[in-house]
Image (cartoon, helix red, strand yellow):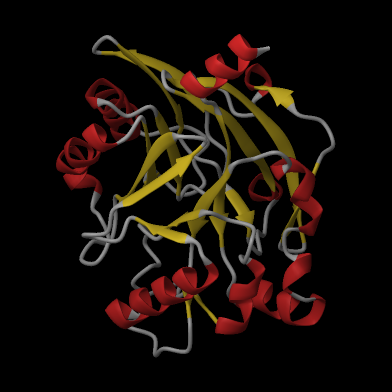
Amino acid sequence: MILGLVAALLSPTVELAAVGDVMLARWVAKRIERDGPAATLKGAETAFSGADLRVGNLECVIGEVPLGKRKAIMLKAPSSTAAALEGRFDVLTLANNHALDCGLPGLASTQRWLDKLGIQPCGVAGRETILVRKGLRIGFIGLSQFDSGGVNSLADWKPCVAALRPKVDVLVVMVHWGLELSPKPTPLQSSTAREMVASGVDLILGSHPHVLQPVEKLEEGGRKGWVAYSLGDFVFDSPTEDRRRTAVLRVRLGMSGVERLSFVPCQIQRGFPVAEKTTRPITQWPAKL
């Protein structure tokens, strides 16, 4: 028994639960107002059970700030929706193509709300994200292939990795990339993922396509890592069946990086996710290469 406790202390493991796009604006905001913030993730609570860390991509601005430069789709959620996140996430990346829908004031407002809720914003330029769980130092880097200026650009991933890798035991990159509605990764996604693993990244969590893309184990430069090219939508007013199919990716992390993956299938119903009761092995992941 004593030997077992010593082994656990020397080789800690942390359970991470990861999801895709969390969007609190538009019709989702109306449902949160009607049904209450607690209803937002109630249907998926079992999928997060036992997780030490819960992470995702926040695909909107939060706060009463003016919209910035007009574009086809603008996503701004009222501050009243922020309570839907409280106690439900530990890290949310802001490195995406909607973080600056209200310019830098909107980005600052979103950060303030996450800080107030005890959620670590990830991907903000100049802001480092390291969490410690069970003695394991886990670093998070948020990157966006699209907007920059305030958030980390995918083009700058190498210095970001080089700066954080020596400070942590496990390195996770959360990256907004790829083509919307495509079930397969682009050549850029595939090549960059391999380079990242070779450079010291243990786990890559993708978003932006709004649909699930493959999960793949990579071996590059004498290192091993995993990439989930896209985790799809999670809290979203998703209009089509392929976008409403989603999952909670469960990852066991240890000193050696990723030790095990599994997932809980979910279905988005009227904007909110509802989880199945069964956890499945990663070999059954619904999106294949």
Residue pictured at 40% horizontal, 67% vertical: 98
Quadrant assignment, res 157? top left
Quadrant for the N terminus, please: top right
Where residue 212 appears, as percent x and y from the top left, is: 57, 39
Quadrant assignment, res 288? top right
In this view, the residue in front, 116 or 183, is 116
Where residue 137 appears, as percent x and y from the top left, is: 39, 37
Residue pictured at 34% horizontal, 77% vertical: 108
Residue pictured at 68% horizontal, 53% vertical: 240
Q: Is residue 58 above or below residue 47?
A: below
Quadrant assignment, res 74? bottom left
Farthest-out residue, left: 159
Q: Is residue 81 visible?
A: yes
In this view, the residue in front, 211 or 196, is 196
Where residue 250 appears, as percent x and y from the top left, is: 62, 33
Left/right of residue 62 with respect to residue 37 in the rendered view: left
Say how many tags the image has: 0
In this view, the residue in front, 122 or 206, is 122
Where residue 251 appears, as percent x and y from the top left, is: 57, 30
